[in-house]
Image (cartoon, grey):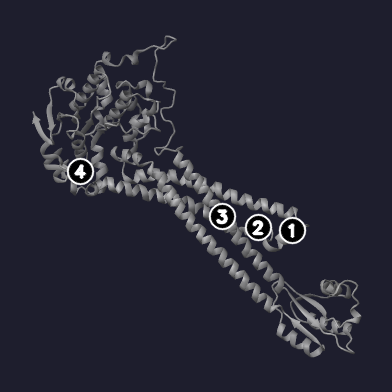
Amino acid sequence: MIKFENVGLRYGLGREVLSDLNFQIAPDSFQFLTGPSGAGKTSLLRLMLLSLRPTRGLVHVFGKEASKIPPKHMPTIRRKIGVVFQDFRLLNHLTTYENVALPLQVRGKMEANYRQDVTDLLDWVGLGERMHVLPPVLSGGEKQRAAIARALIDQPDVLLADEPTGNVDPPLARRLLRLFIELHRSGTSVVIATHDLTLMDQFDARRLVLNSGRLQIYE
Amino acid sequence: MRDASSSIPGDFRSMNEEQKPDRDKKKSRTGTKQTNSPKRPLKSGKTIVPGETVASTALTFVIAIMAFLACFTLGVVAMINASASKWQSDISREVTIQIKPADGREMDDAIRSAGRIALSYEGIAKVTALNDAATARLLEPWLGSGLELSELPVPRLLTVTIADGAKPDFAGMRARIEAEVAGASLDDHRAWIDRLTTMAVTMVLIGISVFLLMMAATVTTVIFATRGAMAGNRDVVEVLHFVGADSKFISKQFQRHFLSLGLKGAAIGTASAIGLFLLLATWSSFSVATPQGDQISALFGTFWPGWLGYIGMLAVTFLVAGLTALTSRWTVHNQIRILQDYNRIA
């Protein structure tokens, strides 16, 4: 699904923050991306999301080399990748319900067809009573759950989550992990960037460890 | 994005219900189980593009001011054009016959003959001879009151009024009057009309130039104000892009929103300009008998820019609104092009 070949990344004229990355995210796989703060986890997720271009090497997404993807096909690729941003990126003028329903709305689906799915998912992530609320009123944990729900609502082929449990208490973090596992079981490849060792210990999965810009993989 | 036959919420429901957060099972103070308020609308009714922001309010305000100035300029230009045409037509609708006195010349006979000759031509509505009293009034500023015309060799005047749309044969009339009435001459005001035409054309050209400059300022201001307002929406464009919206969907949302802002601002500006003209027209009609009112009416007419002026103002409204929408669309397209084109990403 996603394949990196000798990928390197540097910002400006600085040193390479990511070097010689060679790995792939297989269909129906689950992996944690971990490493110390500043190791480049977010940069690597952005490379996978195609919102950042490597300074060298090739990135393949769904069988296509990224630089050969025509711009008009990019929305189709985006629809296959669900993303949970570290800073949530919720639209502050829309309610929680509307934020979560946004991916379905932009695909032109009728609200009557997705209303139940969205409310069920919001119930499940514990935001059932907060669905009419605007994001500025939500706590950090609630925003995070809303962002996760938005990434999951259309069952993407790949889910990229940047510190998805960073703002929640351990019980809710376990609950969200179960959600990701369920999603993985239903066929989605999941990449969770985290430095929460307790969370990783709860599920035996492949670990991609970034250290000093280099990647070590523990299958 | 797979087949939704195994919908996520369904899978979630199959999980342990007891693991759901406690708040789902909380009871309200009345003891009834709290629900998701099914009767409460789930949608806020807000558009995807944020509506009531400081930037959009400021943009509406700027558009209203620029539309007002553009419409006001257009109205004044239309008014000057109408007034200049009226001056021209008022003067060109009259010619004057002058009869110089001379020893032994019977002025009353000469006046009658000249009037008869003028009336014999087609397109002449009436001929009015200025009587002694009117002539004395005319000369009063120079020669003082109590003037006895019989004691002075004062030329006598006849005003010949031309019927609307008629073009009498002035050359023939001039030749006959000068041949048949001794001491008579015909003045068709050609020199005045030429000067007035030149002045009117110059004024209208200056007005059009001012209007074009005003429109250039309006277009530039609206473009930059719209781009300024769009800068605050960069995050919205990015989020929409990352959740899979295509450029057509995103630009449609922004174009619709900014068209509405542009229409609102331009309508306020245009309505204010029209209101100002109506106010001035009302004031002008109330001060019609006063010296100041007469002077202003002579210069500007009745503050009526004409139907063409009002149609032009409506055109300015739609032009400004369309420009706002197109600028937002163009700005969004530029942003999306960078987001969508992998080879342009930094």
Mark 3 chain: B
Residue type indicated by callout 4:
Tyr
Mark 4 chain: A
Q: Mark 1 sits on what residue? A: B292
The percent position of residue A204, horizontal first and vertical second, equals 12, 22
The percent position of residue B64, horizontal first and vertical second, equals 53, 48
Q: CA distance from mark 1 to mark 3?
A: 26 Å
Q: Mark 4 sits on what residue? A: A11
The percent position of residue A94, horizontal first and vertical second, equals 39, 32
Mark 1 chain: B
Residue nearer the viewer, A182 or A7:
A7
Whether the residues at callouts 1 and 3 have beta carbons within 8 Å, the answer is no
Left-right relation of B280 to B242: right
Q: Secondary structure at mark 2?
A: loop
> Do dots 2 and 1 share one subunit?
yes
Q: Mark 2 sits on what residue? A: B304
Residue A190, relative to residue B304: is it above or below?
A: above
Whether the residues at callouts 2 and 3 have beta carbons within 8 Å, the answer is no
Q: Secondary structure at mark 4?
A: loop
Q: CA distance from mark 2 to mark 3?
A: 13 Å
First in sequence: mark 1 vs mark 3: 3
**Label 2 environment density (alpha carbons within 10 Å; few <14, some 14–19, many ≥20):** many
Q: Mark 3 sits on what residue? A: B71
Residue B87, relative to residue B66: is it above or below?
A: below
Residue type indicated by callout 1:
Gln
Q: CA distance from mark 4 to mark 3?
A: 51 Å
Residue type indicated by callout 3:
Cys
Residue type indicated by callout 2:
Trp
Q: Secondary structure at mark 1?
A: helix
